[in-house]
Amino acid sequence: MDTRSSTNIEPPPSSVKTSFLKTCFNGINALSGIGLLSIPYALAQGGWLSLIVFLTIAVICFYTGLLLQRCMDSSSLVHTYPDIGAHAFGRKGRFIVAAIMYVELYLVAIDFLILEGDNLHKLFPAVSFRLGTLHIGGQQAFVLAATLAVLPTTWFRNLNLLAYVAAGGALASVILIGAVLWVGVLDGVGFHERGRLVHWAGLPSTMSLYSFCFSGHAVFPMLYTGMKDRKRLPMSIYKCPNPTPIFFITYAGYGFMGVIGYLMYGDSLMSQITLNLPSSSVAAKVAIYSTLVNPLTKYALMLAPVAEATESALGVSNSAVLGALVRTGLVVGTTVVAQAVPFFADVVGLTGALFGCTTTMLLPCLCYLRVRSKIGGVIKTGLETAACLAILAVGAVIVGFGTYSSVKQIHQRLR
């Protein structure tokens, strides 16, 4: 039975196919980004031994990405992540996967706006705006400015256009790492902090933030479907045009940023390393400006699946004007939440623990095991079954403890 017709929550696959190179840019952009800013803070929360947790989460997410690909290859009817849920568990599976995926992507878009507001406020602390009789200043003013900047990018309807924007995001990540390293080596900050071996109380937050760094799984099926040649997906996501796996390049980038940031500022690290950098440093300004570029290039990519699903549910997929209105409404919604809960690390932690960990660890394993049993396949080894069960156990721990920790901290800040 074609399970795609059982509900209208899922958007139709785009008819505009994306080239191999453009898929590479979109894939890199989905994996790398604002996690670079919070990774030093995550390391400071958990201590040096938490790098073992970081490596474990990276390996798990790499493996579950392969599981998603296997699920998609098992049926020609599977085009998106919710399709995988439907293929595995029917109509209820589609609805659950879609709801979790879209909420996660929506929260990531909110994270972007909070990030923009924080860093612009650091650059221009005295700037304020006036709308009629309403005076808006500080971080809130820059969240509104960032909203106006990203809004036009959300009106693009195909991944070919987004790929050009994504290329800028990948470059911005490289510039950010280089600028932070410059501050440490040449601007007198140095790498003198010793840090702590382990901080048990901070581990739930650490696991949540680490999980967020690799939570690009919700976008991968859309990139896979949008490719002209789907057989090249493993190369595009994990190898791209060169033999070095991009997933592990991303891991190395995150790890390098975390280590140098912790050595530079130790336990005094803020939720974003750019907020620790000296305001007078040219390299620090370069780091902040590159930080501002990254969310602008990724916002539309994260919001695209949510927008397409909403347009499909409302029956306006074929109307450019109504589609633009829907996307504008979604952008306004992210702005409202970013203004109400402007706590970057806590919102990122909640996103990573409750939704990111679910889409990158729990759902791929559950769907894969179910799909293999439904199509009559035999799981090759007991090790594969054990690996999936172990990942489910790890994921459940992160979801439980990480979500509790993030919600508790948000509640305390709002009091």
Image (cartoon, rainbow, N blue to C red):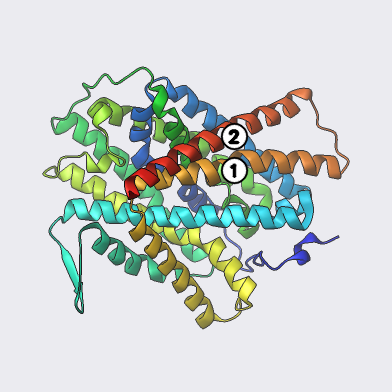
Instruction: Work out whether 303 lies above or below 244.
Output: below
Query: What x and y, as percent, mark residue 413?
Result: 33, 46
Q: Are marks 2 and 1 in contact (CB under 8 Å)?
A: yes
Q: Residue at x 58, y 51 (%)?
A: 218
Question: Which amino acid is tagged 2?
Answer: Gly
Q: Is 35 in front, or is 26?
A: 35
Give the residue drawn at x 80%, y 29%: 380
For marks 2 and 1, give the CA distance: 7 Å
Quadrant location, the N terminus? bottom right
Residue 39 percent coordinates (x, y): 37, 36
Image quarter for residue 299?
A: bottom left
**On the rendered structure, is 390 left or right of 43?**
right
The numbered mark, 2 or 1, whose residue comes first in the sequence reads: 1
Count neighbours of disc 2 (C-alpha within 10 A) and say few if under 14, some if 14 to 19, many if 20 or more: many
Q: Specify few, some or many for label 1: CA neighbours under 10 Å numbering under 14, 14-19, or 20 or more.
A: many
Q: In this figure, which residue is indicated by the disc labeled 2? A: 395
Q: Residue furthest front?
A: 415
Q: Residue at x 42, y 45 (%)?
A: 348
- Amino acid at the residue labelled 1: Thr
Query: Which residue bears the numbered disc 1?
Result: 358
- Determine whether 242 is above or below 137 in the image: above
User: SS class of the residue under badge 2?
Assistant: helix
In the image, is 324 to the left or to the right of 46?
Answer: right
